[in-house]
Image: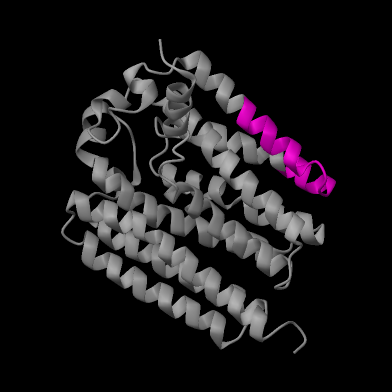
Amino acid sequence: MTTISERLSLYERLMRLDKPIGILLLLWPTLWGLWIAGMGRPSAFVVWIFVLGTVLMRSAGCVINDYADRNFDAHVERTRNRPLATGEVSTHEALILAAVLSLTAFVLILPLDRMVIWLSVPALFLAASYPFTKRFLAIPQAYLGIAFGFGIPMAFAALQQTLPPIAWVMMLANVFWAVAYDTEYAMVDRPDDLKIGIRTSAITFGRFDVAAVMTCYVATLALMAWVGVAAGRGWLYFGGLAVASVIAGYHFTLIRDRDRALCFKAFLHNNWLGGAIFAGLALDYLFRPVGA
Protein backbone atom coordinates (compact mmCIF):
# COMPACT_ATOMS: atom_id res chain seq x y z
CA MET A 1 0.00 0.00 0.00
CA THR A 2 1.60 3.26 -1.13
CA THR A 3 1.41 6.44 0.93
CA ILE A 4 -0.14 9.66 -0.38
CA SER A 5 3.30 11.20 -0.94
CA GLU A 6 4.43 8.11 -2.89
CA ARG A 7 1.24 8.25 -4.98
CA LEU A 8 1.78 11.93 -5.74
CA SER A 9 5.36 11.16 -6.73
CA LEU A 10 4.07 8.56 -9.20
CA TYR A 11 1.61 11.08 -10.66
CA GLU A 12 4.42 13.61 -10.94
CA ARG A 13 6.46 11.12 -12.96
CA LEU A 14 3.43 10.24 -15.07
CA MET A 15 2.90 13.93 -15.87
CA ARG A 16 6.68 14.28 -16.45
CA LEU A 17 6.90 17.27 -14.13
CA ASP A 18 10.33 15.95 -13.23
CA LYS A 19 11.34 16.44 -16.89
CA PRO A 20 10.26 19.99 -17.86
CA ILE A 21 11.73 19.97 -21.39
CA GLY A 22 8.31 19.18 -22.89
CA ILE A 23 6.75 22.13 -21.07
CA LEU A 24 9.43 24.46 -22.42
CA LEU A 25 9.10 23.20 -26.01
CA LEU A 26 5.36 23.86 -25.77
CA LEU A 27 5.80 27.16 -23.95
CA TRP A 28 8.27 28.91 -26.28
CA PRO A 29 6.01 29.03 -29.38
CA THR A 30 3.11 30.05 -27.17
CA LEU A 31 5.17 32.98 -25.87
CA TRP A 32 6.19 33.88 -29.46
CA GLY A 33 2.50 34.11 -30.29
CA LEU A 34 1.63 36.13 -27.18
CA TRP A 35 4.38 38.68 -27.80
CA ILE A 36 3.60 39.14 -31.50
CA ALA A 37 -0.16 39.25 -30.90
CA GLY A 38 0.30 41.62 -27.96
CA MET A 39 2.81 43.76 -29.92
CA GLY A 40 5.36 43.28 -27.17
CA ARG A 41 2.98 44.14 -24.33
CA PRO A 42 0.66 41.18 -23.77
CA SER A 43 -1.65 41.29 -20.79
CA ALA A 44 0.07 39.80 -17.75
CA PHE A 45 -3.20 38.06 -16.84
CA VAL A 46 -3.42 36.43 -20.27
CA VAL A 47 0.24 35.38 -20.13
CA TRP A 48 -0.34 33.81 -16.71
CA ILE A 49 -3.33 31.84 -18.03
CA PHE A 50 -1.38 30.58 -21.03
CA VAL A 51 1.70 29.62 -19.01
CA LEU A 52 -0.33 27.67 -16.45
CA GLY A 53 -2.47 26.18 -19.22
CA THR A 54 0.68 25.05 -21.01
CA VAL A 55 1.86 23.18 -17.91
CA LEU A 56 -1.54 21.55 -17.43
CA MET A 57 -2.04 20.50 -21.05
CA ARG A 58 1.50 19.18 -21.46
CA SER A 59 0.97 17.15 -18.28
CA ALA A 60 -2.35 15.83 -19.59
CA GLY A 61 -0.69 15.03 -22.91
CA CYS A 62 2.01 12.99 -21.18
CA VAL A 63 -0.58 10.99 -19.28
CA ILE A 64 -2.56 10.27 -22.46
CA ASN A 65 0.65 9.41 -24.30
CA ASP A 66 1.65 6.87 -21.65
CA TYR A 67 -1.88 5.45 -21.63
CA ALA A 68 -1.73 4.96 -25.40
CA ASP A 69 1.79 3.47 -25.26
CA ARG A 70 1.34 1.41 -22.11
CA ASN A 71 1.79 -1.86 -24.02
CA PHE A 72 4.85 -0.57 -25.90
CA ASP A 73 6.80 1.34 -23.25
CA ALA A 74 7.87 -1.79 -21.38
CA HIS A 75 9.78 -2.89 -24.50
CA VAL A 76 11.66 0.38 -24.97
CA GLU A 77 14.83 0.92 -22.95
CA ARG A 78 14.17 4.61 -22.21
CA THR A 79 10.50 4.19 -21.18
CA ARG A 80 10.30 0.80 -19.49
CA ASN A 81 10.18 2.33 -15.99
CA ARG A 82 7.27 4.70 -16.61
CA PRO A 83 4.48 4.25 -14.00
CA LEU A 84 1.89 2.85 -16.43
CA ALA A 85 4.39 0.49 -18.06
CA THR A 86 5.37 -0.91 -14.65
CA GLY A 87 1.77 -1.10 -13.41
CA GLU A 88 2.41 1.28 -10.50
CA VAL A 89 -0.43 3.48 -11.79
CA SER A 90 -3.61 1.94 -13.20
CA THR A 91 -5.19 2.91 -16.52
CA HIS A 92 -8.28 4.05 -14.60
CA GLU A 93 -6.19 6.42 -12.48
CA ALA A 94 -4.43 7.75 -15.57
CA LEU A 95 -7.66 8.55 -17.40
CA ILE A 96 -9.08 10.34 -14.37
CA LEU A 97 -5.86 12.35 -13.97
CA ALA A 98 -5.86 13.36 -17.67
CA ALA A 99 -9.52 14.41 -17.42
CA VAL A 100 -8.90 16.52 -14.29
CA LEU A 101 -5.90 18.26 -15.87
CA SER A 102 -7.80 18.99 -19.09
CA LEU A 103 -10.86 20.27 -17.26
CA THR A 104 -8.71 22.54 -15.10
CA ALA A 105 -7.04 23.95 -18.21
CA PHE A 106 -10.47 24.57 -19.76
CA VAL A 107 -11.70 26.41 -16.66
CA LEU A 108 -8.62 28.63 -16.86
CA ILE A 109 -9.54 30.01 -20.31
CA LEU A 110 -13.19 30.78 -19.48
CA PRO A 111 -12.44 34.48 -18.75
CA LEU A 112 -10.92 34.86 -22.25
CA ASP A 113 -12.61 35.66 -25.57
CA ARG A 114 -15.15 33.13 -26.84
CA MET A 115 -12.91 32.42 -29.86
CA VAL A 116 -10.27 31.01 -27.49
CA ILE A 117 -12.85 28.68 -25.96
CA TRP A 118 -13.88 27.39 -29.38
CA LEU A 119 -10.23 26.88 -30.37
CA SER A 120 -9.66 24.85 -27.21
CA VAL A 121 -11.82 22.07 -28.69
CA PRO A 122 -9.47 21.21 -31.60
CA ALA A 123 -6.51 21.87 -29.30
CA LEU A 124 -7.74 19.20 -26.88
CA PHE A 125 -8.48 16.80 -29.72
CA LEU A 126 -4.96 17.23 -31.12
CA ALA A 127 -3.34 16.67 -27.72
CA ALA A 128 -5.45 13.59 -27.00
CA SER A 129 -5.12 11.98 -30.44
CA TYR A 130 -1.41 12.56 -31.10
CA PRO A 131 -0.18 9.47 -29.20
CA PHE A 132 -2.33 7.23 -31.41
CA THR A 133 -0.99 8.68 -34.69
CA LYS A 134 2.25 6.74 -34.20
CA ARG A 135 0.34 3.67 -35.36
CA PHE A 136 -0.49 4.96 -38.85
CA LEU A 137 1.19 8.29 -39.74
CA ALA A 138 4.62 8.17 -41.39
CA ILE A 139 5.66 11.44 -39.71
CA PRO A 140 3.58 11.78 -36.52
CA GLN A 141 6.00 14.51 -35.43
CA ALA A 142 4.26 16.90 -37.85
CA TYR A 143 0.99 16.22 -36.04
CA LEU A 144 2.78 16.92 -32.78
CA GLY A 145 3.96 20.25 -34.21
CA ILE A 146 0.36 21.27 -34.88
CA ALA A 147 -0.66 20.24 -31.37
CA PHE A 148 2.30 22.03 -29.76
CA GLY A 149 1.76 25.11 -31.91
CA PHE A 150 -1.95 25.56 -31.28
CA GLY A 151 -1.18 27.99 -28.49
CA ILE A 152 -0.18 30.47 -31.21
CA PRO A 153 -3.62 30.99 -32.82
CA MET A 154 -5.16 30.83 -29.35
CA ALA A 155 -2.85 33.67 -28.28
CA PHE A 156 -4.00 35.81 -31.21
CA ALA A 157 -7.63 34.97 -30.44
CA ALA A 158 -7.12 36.03 -26.81
CA LEU A 159 -5.34 39.30 -27.55
CA GLN A 160 -6.64 40.36 -30.97
CA GLN A 161 -9.90 38.40 -31.33
CA THR A 162 -8.79 37.46 -34.85
CA LEU A 163 -6.58 34.90 -36.60
CA PRO A 164 -4.34 36.76 -39.07
CA PRO A 165 -2.08 34.95 -41.60
CA ILE A 166 1.00 35.60 -39.45
CA ALA A 167 -0.45 33.31 -36.76
CA TRP A 168 -0.66 30.39 -39.17
CA VAL A 169 2.81 31.05 -40.55
CA MET A 170 4.16 30.93 -37.01
CA MET A 171 2.33 27.69 -36.41
CA LEU A 172 3.81 26.24 -39.61
CA ALA A 173 7.27 27.28 -38.38
CA ASN A 174 6.56 25.38 -35.18
CA VAL A 175 5.56 22.29 -37.16
CA PHE A 176 8.96 22.25 -38.86
CA TRP A 177 10.69 22.86 -35.54
CA ALA A 178 8.78 19.99 -33.89
CA VAL A 179 9.70 17.63 -36.74
CA ALA A 180 13.35 18.64 -36.26
CA TYR A 181 13.59 18.17 -32.49
CA ASP A 182 11.28 15.18 -32.25
CA THR A 183 13.16 13.40 -35.01
CA GLU A 184 16.28 13.83 -32.89
CA TYR A 185 14.26 12.31 -30.04
CA ALA A 186 13.05 9.47 -32.27
CA MET A 187 16.61 8.73 -33.39
CA VAL A 188 17.27 7.70 -29.79
CA ASP A 189 14.49 5.10 -29.80
CA ARG A 190 14.76 3.96 -33.44
CA PRO A 191 16.11 0.43 -32.73
CA ASP A 192 13.33 -0.22 -30.20
CA ASP A 193 10.61 1.38 -32.35
CA LEU A 194 11.56 -0.83 -35.30
CA LYS A 195 11.12 -3.90 -33.13
CA ILE A 196 7.67 -2.98 -31.82
CA GLY A 197 6.33 -1.50 -35.06
CA ILE A 198 5.78 2.15 -34.09
CA ARG A 199 6.14 4.70 -36.89
CA THR A 200 8.36 7.75 -36.43
CA SER A 201 10.00 10.35 -38.64
CA ALA A 202 13.42 8.87 -37.83
CA ILE A 203 12.30 5.59 -39.37
CA THR A 204 10.56 7.27 -42.32
CA PHE A 205 13.52 9.49 -43.18
CA GLY A 206 15.93 6.57 -42.83
CA ARG A 207 19.47 7.44 -43.89
CA PHE A 208 18.32 10.97 -44.73
CA ASP A 209 17.33 11.65 -41.12
CA VAL A 210 20.13 14.15 -40.39
CA ALA A 211 19.49 16.02 -43.64
CA ALA A 212 15.76 16.13 -42.87
CA VAL A 213 16.37 17.54 -39.38
CA MET A 214 18.63 20.30 -40.72
CA THR A 215 16.18 21.12 -43.54
CA CYS A 216 13.41 21.51 -40.97
CA TYR A 217 15.58 23.85 -38.90
CA VAL A 218 16.22 25.98 -42.01
CA ALA A 219 12.49 26.08 -42.78
CA THR A 220 11.68 27.08 -39.19
CA LEU A 221 14.16 29.95 -39.16
CA ALA A 222 13.18 31.13 -42.66
CA LEU A 223 9.50 31.27 -41.70
CA MET A 224 10.30 33.07 -38.45
CA ALA A 225 12.38 35.55 -40.45
CA TRP A 226 9.30 36.22 -42.60
CA VAL A 227 7.32 36.72 -39.39
CA GLY A 228 9.89 39.27 -38.23
CA VAL A 229 9.59 41.24 -41.46
CA ALA A 230 5.78 41.08 -41.39
CA ALA A 231 5.72 42.27 -37.77
CA GLY A 232 8.20 45.08 -38.45
CA ARG A 233 10.84 43.71 -36.11
CA GLY A 234 14.44 44.93 -36.02
CA TRP A 235 17.98 43.75 -35.58
CA LEU A 236 17.52 42.39 -32.05
CA TYR A 237 14.88 39.96 -33.26
CA PHE A 238 17.00 38.85 -36.18
CA GLY A 239 19.94 38.60 -33.82
CA GLY A 240 17.92 36.07 -31.85
CA LEU A 241 17.30 34.13 -35.05
CA ALA A 242 21.04 34.23 -35.78
CA VAL A 243 21.79 32.75 -32.36
CA ALA A 244 19.13 30.09 -33.00
CA SER A 245 20.78 29.22 -36.32
CA VAL A 246 24.14 28.75 -34.57
CA ILE A 247 22.43 26.43 -32.08
CA ALA A 248 20.90 24.47 -34.97
CA GLY A 249 24.36 24.15 -36.49
CA TYR A 250 25.64 22.80 -33.19
CA HIS A 251 22.89 20.19 -33.25
CA PHE A 252 24.27 18.94 -36.56
CA THR A 253 27.57 18.16 -34.85
CA LEU A 254 25.66 16.19 -32.21
CA ILE A 255 23.42 14.09 -34.47
CA ARG A 256 25.59 13.52 -37.55
CA ASP A 257 27.00 10.23 -36.18
CA ARG A 258 23.58 9.17 -34.85
CA ASP A 259 24.94 8.43 -31.40
CA ARG A 260 21.86 7.85 -29.24
CA ALA A 261 23.12 9.81 -26.23
CA LEU A 262 24.14 12.79 -28.38
CA CYS A 263 20.85 12.75 -30.28
CA PHE A 264 19.03 12.97 -26.96
CA LYS A 265 21.33 15.81 -25.92
CA ALA A 266 20.42 17.65 -29.14
CA PHE A 267 16.72 17.15 -28.41
CA LEU A 268 17.06 18.62 -24.91
CA HIS A 269 19.15 21.49 -26.28
CA ASN A 270 16.19 22.73 -28.35
CA ASN A 271 15.07 24.58 -25.25
CA TRP A 272 17.88 27.06 -25.96
CA LEU A 273 16.87 27.42 -29.60
CA GLY A 274 13.29 28.31 -28.71
CA GLY A 275 14.49 30.55 -25.90
CA ALA A 276 16.90 32.41 -28.22
CA ILE A 277 14.06 33.24 -30.61
CA PHE A 278 11.88 34.47 -27.76
CA ALA A 279 14.70 36.48 -26.17
CA GLY A 280 15.36 38.27 -29.46
CA LEU A 281 11.65 38.94 -29.89
CA ALA A 282 11.13 40.24 -26.36
CA LEU A 283 14.25 42.43 -26.43
CA ASP A 284 13.32 43.85 -29.81
CA TYR A 285 9.88 44.90 -28.59
CA LEU A 286 11.42 46.24 -25.37
CA PHE A 287 13.92 48.50 -27.12
CA ARG A 288 11.98 49.05 -30.35
CA PRO A 289 8.31 49.30 -29.32
CA VAL A 290 5.64 49.47 -32.01
CA GLY A 291 5.49 52.95 -33.51
CA ALA A 292 8.97 53.89 -32.33
Visible residue check, residue 182: yes
Q: Give the magenta part as a residue range.
A: 100-119
- 233, 63: nearer the viewer: 63
Residue sitting at x 45%, y 17% = 3
Depicted 135 relative to depicted 289: above or below: above
Whether residue 156 sits left or right of residue 150 in the image: it is right
Whether residue 284 sits left or right of residue 4 in the image: it is right
Check residue 105 for magenta coloring: yes
Check residue 156 for magenta coloring: no
In the image, residue 31 lies at what x, y percent? 61, 61
In the image, residue 185 lies at what x, y percent? 32, 48
- 249, 286: nearer the viewer: 286
Residue sitting at x 40%, y 9% = 1
Depicted 264 relative to depicted 224: above or below: above
Q: Main secondary structure of the magenta part?
A: helix
In the image, residue 188 lies at what x, y percent? 25, 45
Q: Quadrant of residue 107?
A: top right
Residue sitting at x 26%, y 47% = 187
Q: How many marks?
A: 0
Q: Quadrant of residue 80?
A: top left
In the image, residue 163 lies at what x, y percent? 75, 58
